């Protein structure tokens, strides 16, 4: 860590600012990951197809519809 700090001090001011911005970005990204809540608003979205397809066929069809 100390080596990294020494390297940071040797950078020109504009690159020090860029490094600082990147560190801030990493903190923000870490905060966002903690707050992710699993959405399940899609549940039941394929209900109308349950009589046409088996669960495996429906899974394959859903991937096809999504373009995967």
Image (spheres, rainbow, N blue to C red):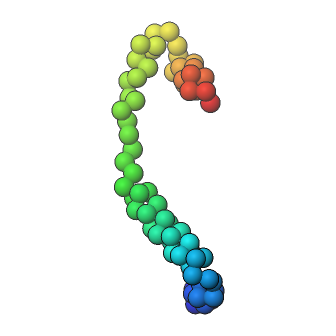
Which quadrant of the rendered structure holds the N terminus?
bottom right
Quadrant of the drawing holding the C terminus: top right
Residue 56 visible (yes or no): no
Residue 42 in view here: yes
Q: Is residue 8 above or below residue 42?
A: below
Point out residue 55 in the picture as x, y percentages from the top left corner: 51, 21
Question: Residue furthest toward the top?
Answer: 52
Q: x and y percent of residue 13 in the render? A: 57, 81
Of 12 and 63, which appears nearest the observer?
A: 12
The residue under the point 49% across, 65% down is 25
Measured as percent of width and height from the top left, residue 16 is found at: 56, 79
Number of marks = 0
Instruction: Name the spot of residue 18 as percent of width and height, x first.
Output: 56, 72
At x 61%, y 27%, the residue is: 67
Q: Nearer the viewer, residue 55 or 39?
A: 39
Q: Residue at x 58, y 76 (%)?
A: 14
Q: Eyeballing the image, is 38 above or below 57?
A: below
């Amino acid at each position: 860590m100390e080596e990294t700090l020494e390297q940071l001090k040797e950078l020109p001011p504009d690159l020090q600012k860029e490094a600082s911005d990147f560190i801030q970005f990493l903190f923000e990204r870490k905060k966002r990951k903690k707050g992710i809540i699993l959405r399940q608003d899609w549940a039941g979205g394929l209900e109308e197809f349950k009589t046409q397809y088996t669960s495996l066929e429906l899974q394959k069809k859903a991937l096809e519809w999504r373009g995967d």
